[in-house]
Image (cartoon, grey):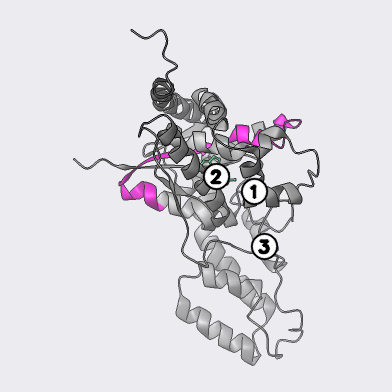
Amino acid sequence: MMTKKTILTGDRPTGKLHIGHYLGSLKNRVALQNSGEYNTYVMIADMQALTDNARNPEKIRNSLIQVALDYLAVGIDPAKSTILVQSQIPALNELTMYYLDLVTVSRLERNPTVKAEIKQKNFDQSIPAGFLVYPVSQTADITAFKADTIPVGDDQEPMMEQAREIVRTFNNTYNTDILVEPKGYFPPKGQGRLPGLDGNAKMSKSLNNAIYLADSADELRSKVMSMYTDPNHIHVDDPGQVEGNMVFTYLDVFDPDKKKVAELKAQYQHGGLGDVKIKRYLNEVLEAEFGPIRQRREAYAKDIPAVYEMLQAGSAKANEVAEQTLQEVRDAIGLNYFKA
Ligand code: TRP
């Protein structure tokens, strides 16, 4: 029998997930899960979320259930994937502690994603120590499950690199091969990042330019109607720009009917196609994709205790796997003084 490959991926619970998350990662995960070729673990990384929200644990607590609902709604299926909560797996912290001894502070400070986040969050001289080392904790998340395939957005490549370094250093230092080097699994080039409603390169909660999986049909419609198009396209008969026009950017991504999109673009560029009309069409396209997701989300939200039970069961199962890896790690280092 061929041994299956193993997936581990996750999200920080700092809010509801949006359609950018869906495009950049969730969609991939569901496809991989359904391929049957992987053992799949999906982690809600609440400890990582706390690294810059330690004084606001309520936010993390509330977001945890929102993210779990988003997962279930898009089709992450607890019968096929183990959904777990990071803070409920104690072995991860001990692994992190051992790995921290194998990285230098200057290496941590060089991680480009962390660097960008430090700037964006205005930490300046007061970077929480836990924040700086979260890539090491993320390496613990990945290696605890011996995951080799990590479906994530492009911004996570530096984390994968750092994880591979730690794995190699660990295996070399303790003369073992128990840890597995992970590889990122990224969306096809150019398809990973969905810009915001306002045309900003990134869709995000803090920029207030996101469509959430949880948005109602009305919210979705009014957001689509507010989208950034071509500011010079004032009269219906004016020729319009499709480049940088969010309506067409989104149609390119979400409309399966590519021929129709090409025709609409031609008409818009020529003049005679109004923004309201094209936005109504985009709304239909998005509703076709996200309407069923919203309905599933609403159904799951009716029984929150069942969602917590699912998370508890997933965490218990994950805990056994992580404990096993931890024992191997302790053995490799030689911290097994009391073993016969
Ligand atoms: N850092 C990831 C993000 O911000 C979330 C995450 C935490 C993760 N642990 C992980 C991703 C382990 C992959 C594997 O999106």
Quadrant position of the C terminus in the picture: top left
Task: Name the side, left or right, on which 152 lies relative to 20.
Answer: left
Front residue of 29/257: it is 29
Give the residue displayed 74% in from the left and 32% down from the top. 56
Three-letter code for the amino acid on which mark 2 is drawn: Asp
Bin the neighbour count of mark 1 within 10 Å (Cα to Cα): few under 14, some 14-19, many 20 and up: few
Give the residue displayed 50% in from the left and 70% down from the top. 255
Label 1's element? helix
**Numbered badge on residue 196:** 3
Give the labeled residue for mark 1.
110
Front residue of 220/128: it is 128
Residue 33 colored in magenta in the image: yes
Give the residue displayed 55% in from the left and 46% down from the top. 159
Give the labeled residue for mark 2.
70
What is the CA distance from the residue labelled 3 to the residue labelled 2? 19 Å
Q: Is residue 340 above or below residue 171?
A: above
Q: Is residue 279 above or below residue 336?
A: below
Please tell me which of labels 1 and 2 falls first in the chain: 2
| Residue 22 percent coordinates (x, y) | 53, 54
Give the residue displayed 65% in from the left and 62% down from the top. 221
Task: Name the side, left or right, on which 128 lies relative to 165.
Answer: right
| Residue 10 percent coordinates (x, y) | 52, 42
Q: Nearer the viewer, mark 3 or mark 2?
A: 3
Label 3's element? loop
Bin the neighbour count of mark 3 within 10 Å (Cα to Cα): few under 14, some 14-19, many 20 and up: many
- Quarter holding ligand 1: top right
Task: State the extent of the magenta-drawn residues as a range.
Answer: 31-58
Please tell me which of labels 3 and 1 falls first in the chain: 1
